[in-house]
Amino acid sequence: TASQSVREVRFYTLEEIQQHNTCKENWIIIHNKVYDVTKLLNEHPGGEEVLLEHGGIDATDCFEDIGHSTDARFLSESFLIGEVHPVSSWLSNWFTLCVCVSPADIISL
Ligand code: HEM
């Protein structure tokens, strides 16, 4: 039916994404999209270390610096679970610009 073809976007705040950075789960952010790469860890050709290092945070620069192939980008789709909530993302950028700290630092206080 028509309703089934509509893909809903699940939004996550940066705080929620951080909460899934545990020894059991590994969520990362690439271009404002959220990926649960827990099941990729063992199979990632670049190793699990780089993914773990970016758990709960933005891995866009690292992902792009490596120059991932088209295949890798296609593969990433299967780990996509949502997007960073726009307000959360905006606030984070604002904090980083104006206060030179990330909200994650404040939350951890
Ligand atoms: C959903 C996310 C990701 C997927 C599906 C993925 C997939 C892949 C694949 C298929 C390769 C083999 C080379 C290629 O096809 O381009 C690769 C290599 C690599 N990836 Fe990823 N990757 C992801 C995220 C990341 C992130 C976030 C980082 C860095 C923090 C990273 C770092 C690397 C490195 C260092 C290599 C090795 C490059 C080399 O040996 O020349 N990857 N990845």
Image (spheres, helix red, strand yellow):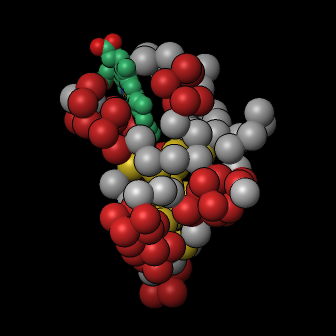
Left or right? Give the position of 86 relative to 108: left
Q: Residue at x 56, y 21 (%)?
A: 48
Q: Quadrant of ligand 1?
A: top left
| Furthest-bottom residue in this view | 2
Q: Nearer the viewer, residue 56 or 44?
A: 56
Residue 81, compared with residue 91, is above or below; it is above
- Residue 49 found in image quarter: top right
> Which part of the image, by quadrant, shows the C terminus?
bottom right
| Furthest-front residue in this view | 99
Q: Confirm whether residue 39 shows in the render.
A: yes
Q: Residue at x 34, y 44 (%)?
A: 60
Q: Confirm whether residue 17 shows in the render.
A: no
- Residue 95 found in image quarter: bottom left
Q: Residue at x 61, y 20 (%)?
A: 42
Q: Nearer the viewer, residue 67 or 102?
A: 102
Left or right? Give the position of 58 relative to 64: right
How many marks are shown on the rendered structure? Answer: 0
Left or right? Give the position of 67 relative to 59: left
Coordinates of residue 66 in the picture (x, y in percent): 27, 26
Coordinates of residue 8 in the picture (x, y in percent): 50, 77
Q: Residue at x 68, y 44 (%)?
A: 21
Coordinates of residue 24 in the picture (x, y in percent): 77, 36
Coordinates of residue 99 in the picture (x, y in percent): 43, 65
Residue 17, compared with residue 37, is above or below; it is below
Left or right? Give the position of 64 relative to 60: left
